[in-house]
């Protein structure tokens, strides 16, 4: 049986450190604020946004939630983003994705001020990640890095395989691993013999979005397996991209779903928001 990486415990520690720092800032009259915008009624997004609000409360940030109806126009959403860009109480702005189909994610993100872009989705922040100049680290990949670190595994020189090439996870994840001197391979739906490539990995990050796709035959004995997936199985139960039951006896370390990467994404969002707030108030 692999060691199970407790994302809840690691995230609780990160949030506790942030809470202490936030308390100190408050004593100096500095408050940190995060605006979370959600459009429409996607039930999963509603859960994630609620978890983000709870985390703000736990660390002592002010959170401002904007729940807009499904039929919100691009103009209305842009007007809100503009208002938040200019609101000094707001240090971080997060527009929960996916947006309803009639809204253009990219265009909306491009209009968030880069110094308030706590998701690190704006092209300016994406570019900075590429050159290793991190103002904000993208929340999910940064959370994954913390989980790997929590196992005591060195990344330098290791075979790292990332399955998935999204702008939000796969691509930035590969970059963060590369910056730690991993030998990184990015796989995707056109990869030939995915099993063979994945089985080379000392560190395997699965971000494909297909329930339980990664079975034991994709995994090297003793590997660190990080599951970014957030799917529903045939019984409607939350599950990852990794078939936990099949992989748990082969991996050295494995993250569960729920309780793995999800809570870390939120902890890293808190970290970025603190960074933004300190920057806005000129605190080192
Ligand atoms: N703008 N959109 C923006 N930023 C993000 O960072 C996200 N992401 C992804 C979706 N859209 C986004 C999230 O917030 C995924 N994501 C996210 C955040 C939290 C959790 C899962 C995904 C989470 O709290 N997961 C819990 C279980 C939740 C449940 O019960 O459904 C867990 O323990 O994994």
Image (cartoon, grey):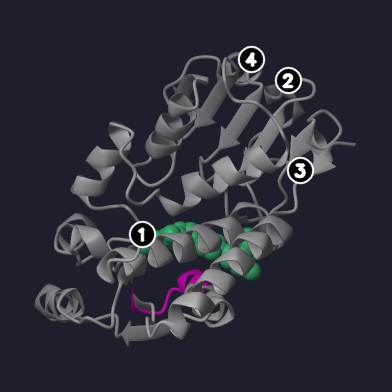
Label 2 Cα neighbours within 10 Å, binned few <14 / some 14-19 / many ≥20: many
Q: Which marked residue is nearer to the observer: mark 3 or mark 2?
A: 2
Q: Which residue is denoted by mark 3 in the rendering?
A: 244
Element under label 2? Answer: loop
Q: Which residue is denoted by mark 2 in the rendering?
A: 220
Report the Cα–Cα distance between label 2 and label 1: 43 Å
| Residue drawn at x 68%, y 24% as measured from the top left | 218
Respond yes or no on whether mark 4 lies under 8 Å from ligand 1.
no
> Measured along the vertical axis of the image, is residue 106 above or below residue 161?
below
Q: Give x and y (percent) for residue 262.
A: 58, 58
Q: Give x and y (percent) for residue 22.
A: 49, 75
Task: Report the side of 48 relative to 215 (left or right).
Answer: left
Residue lying at the far front of the rendered structure:
28
Task: Report the side of 4 relative to 207 (left or right).
Answer: right
N-terminal of the two: label 2 or label 1?
2
N-terminal of the two: label 4 or label 2?
4
Q: Give x and y (percent) for residue 107.
A: 15, 59
**In the rendered image, is residue 271 in sight?**
yes
Element under label 1? Answer: loop
Respond yes or no on whether mark 1 lies under 8 Å from ligand 1.
no
Report the Cα–Cα distance between label 3 and label 2: 14 Å
N-terminal of the two: label 1 or label 3?
3
N-terminal of the two: label 4 or label 3?
4
Q: Do the residues labelled 4 and 2 touch (CB within 8 Å)?
A: yes
| Residue drawn at x 54%, y 83% as measured from the top left | 57
Q: Which residue is denoted by mark 1 in the rendering?
A: 284
Q: Nearer the viewer, residue 270 or 229?
A: 270
Q: State which quarter of the image contains the N terminus.
A: top right
Answer whether residue 40 is magenta in the image. Answer: yes
Answer whether residue 227 is magenta in the image. Answer: no
């Amino acid at each position: 049986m692999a060691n199970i990486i407790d994302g809840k415990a690691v995230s609780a520690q990160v949030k506790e450190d942030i809470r202490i720092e936030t308390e100190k800032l408050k004593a100096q009259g500095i408050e940190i604020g995060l605006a979370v915008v959600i459009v429409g009624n996607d039930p999963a997004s509603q859960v994630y946004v609620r978890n983000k609000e709870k985390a703000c409360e736990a660390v002592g940030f002010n959170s401002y939630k904007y729940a807009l109806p499904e039929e919100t126009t691009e103009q209305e959403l842009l007007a809100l983003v503009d208002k938040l860009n200019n609101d000094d109480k707001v240090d971080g702005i997060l527009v929960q994705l996916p947006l309803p189909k009639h809204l253009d994610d990219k265009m909306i993100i491009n209009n968030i001020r880069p110094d308030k872009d706590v998701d690190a989705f704006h092209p300016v922040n994406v570019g900075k990640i590429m050159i290793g100049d991190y103002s904000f680290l993208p929340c999910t990949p940064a959370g994954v890095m913390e989980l790997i670190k929590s196992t005591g595994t060195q990344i330098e020189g290791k075979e790292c395989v990332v399955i998935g090439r999204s702008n939000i996870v796969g691509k930035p994840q590969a970059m963060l691993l590369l910056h730690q001197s991993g030998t990184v391979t990015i796989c995707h739906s056109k990869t030939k013999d995915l099993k063979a490539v994945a089985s080379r990995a000392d560190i395997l990050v699965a971000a494909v979005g297909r329930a339980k796709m990664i079975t034991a035959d994709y995994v090297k004995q003793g590997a660190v397996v990080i599951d970014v997936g957030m799917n529903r199985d045939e019984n409607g139960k939350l599950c990852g991209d990794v078939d936990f039951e099949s992989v748990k006896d082969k991996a050295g370390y494995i993250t569960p779903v729920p309780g793995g990467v999800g809570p870390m994404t939120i902890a890293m969002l808190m970290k970025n928001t603190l960074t933004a707030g300190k920057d806005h108030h000129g605190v080192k």
